[in-house]
Image (tube, rainbow, N blue to C red):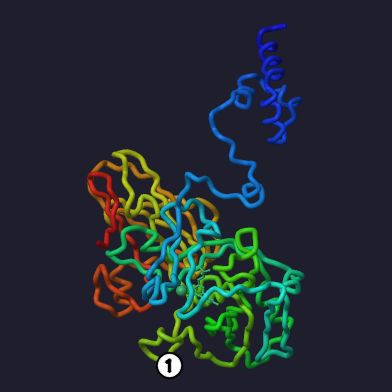
Amino acid sequence: MDSKRTNRRELLKGGAALAGGLAALGQTPASAQEHDHSTMAIGGAPNDYPMILGSKEEIEYGHRSKYVTSVRIPHPVGRDSPDEFGKVMHVASPLQDSVGVVTPSSLHYVATTRGSYMPDVDPKKHTLTIHGSVDRALTFTMDDLKRLPSVTRLQFIECAGNRHNGRQKNVQESHGMTSCAEWTGVLLSTLLKECGLKGTATWFVAEGAEEVKGASSMPIAKAMDDCVIAYGMNGEAIRPQNGFPLRLCVPGFEGIFNTKYLRRIKVTDRYYMNYNDYGHLDRDPTEAALAFQIGPKSVITKPSGGMQLSGRGYYEISGLAWSGGGAIRTVEVSTDGGKKWNRAEIKATPQRMAHTRFGYMWNWDGNETEILSRCTDEIGQQQPTREQVAKYWNVPFDRNYRVPGLDNSVMPWRVARDGSVTNGLA
Ligand SMILES: Nc1nc2c(c(=O)[nH]1)N[C@H]1C(S)=C(S)[C@@H](COP(=O)(O)O)O[C@H]1N2
Ligand SMILES: [Mo]
């Protein structure tokens, strides 16, 4: 018997822990015998790590590692949060720690409209009614909806209040009111075909279940195109904060249209003024109060404000790009304050109206500089500069300007000689 074989035997014989350990991974000790002993040692050698799987909690609904501490923060979108009643109405997602494109449900940003709260909706009692300019009004229970053909799509949502200025310290404060999740549900067009649209049907109003209903008017063409009545989010039921048990997903439209706790859709022959329009009518009261489609936008999430580079050398600049106009086509990164733009690598096939992860390998020479990103979407729209956005909203150009709508301008991060990264608008 050669010494190698002996070693292996002894390892197996003496290693009850090893055999049990492999069995727990779905490997039998017999198949383990196929491996040579250098592989076996991984399972065989006892280590110092305490075992964390075993508690009822961890078995039933797992938690992340205690070493991972990334959290959401209260966010003042246009008004104080917490407000005068101590309620936090807006919560920003920690984009600085994001990887890939899916926001975990527990870190998805949350926005509630003024005076709104998070209703505790019983899915067994919840229904969705579609009425108005239709041949027959229909009411669907959750079970009804789940019998219909489903779709699953990645989609970003962004609050119109997601605006950046020189006062914000990091990307969570400047851009954290957007997130991207995988939503599952039924196409709204499937339901509307069941109801039958009347010839006069040109708009629809979607309404939530709270006292303040969060109703918005949208063009019927959008309903028939790609709106989803969603009950699933990232592989499980939608979280209460994001609209449990049912929400309307309106790809690429401003966040406010994505009606949570959806209970009623009225098909109409005109734009209906609603509570959501209140406060958005600062200019021409005859025009549609809210801007529908979100423009192309991108931001570098790493390195970003508050981070520290450890010295000159290679870093992957990583960030997110998205557009209400469709899929992202290209992202460019500048590492010299916008003089030269370099094509970034897109990390996975860009999806329509979904966050797209980009990366660019950068060799930092240790000098002070500014890093920026800009994107172009599939219909050729390019992310604007800050000057262009100021002109669009007709406000004087200022690094701290306040525009009345969405700000999709390019965001600069400043890198100092000591490696510290700060807001380039400050
Ligand atoms: N019913 C209802 N729907 C709502 C809201 C609300 O307060 N109530 N907030 C809207 C706003 S302002 C935004 S930006 C998005 C936020 O979705 P989220 O909280 O899932 O991120 O939901 C929209 N839908
Ligand atoms: Mo919002």
* Residue drawn at (24%, 71%) of the image: 398
Please tell me which residue lies in front, 421 or 187. Answer: 421
Residue 117 picture location, percent across and down: 52, 76
Q: Is residue 311 above or below residue 115?
A: above
User: Mark 1: which secondary structure?
Assistant: loop
Quadrant position of the C terminus in the picture: bottom left
Quadrant position of the N terminus in the picture: top right
Q: Is residue 270 left or right of residue 316?
A: right
Please tell me which residue lies in front, 95 or 9. Answer: 9
Residue at image mark 1: 286
* Residue drawn at (29%, 51%) of the image: 421
Q: Amino acid at mark 1?
A: Thr
Q: Is residue 317 above or below residue 176?
A: above
For the question of whether residue 218 can be seen, the reply is no
Residue 235 picture location, percent across and down: 64, 58
For the question of whether residue 271 can be seen, the reply is yes
Q: Is residue 135 above or below residue 164?
A: below
Residue 383 picture location, percent across and down: 39, 66
The residue furthest top is 1
Residue 390 picture location, percent across and down: 30, 74
Please tell me which residue lies in front, 199 or 236. Answer: 236
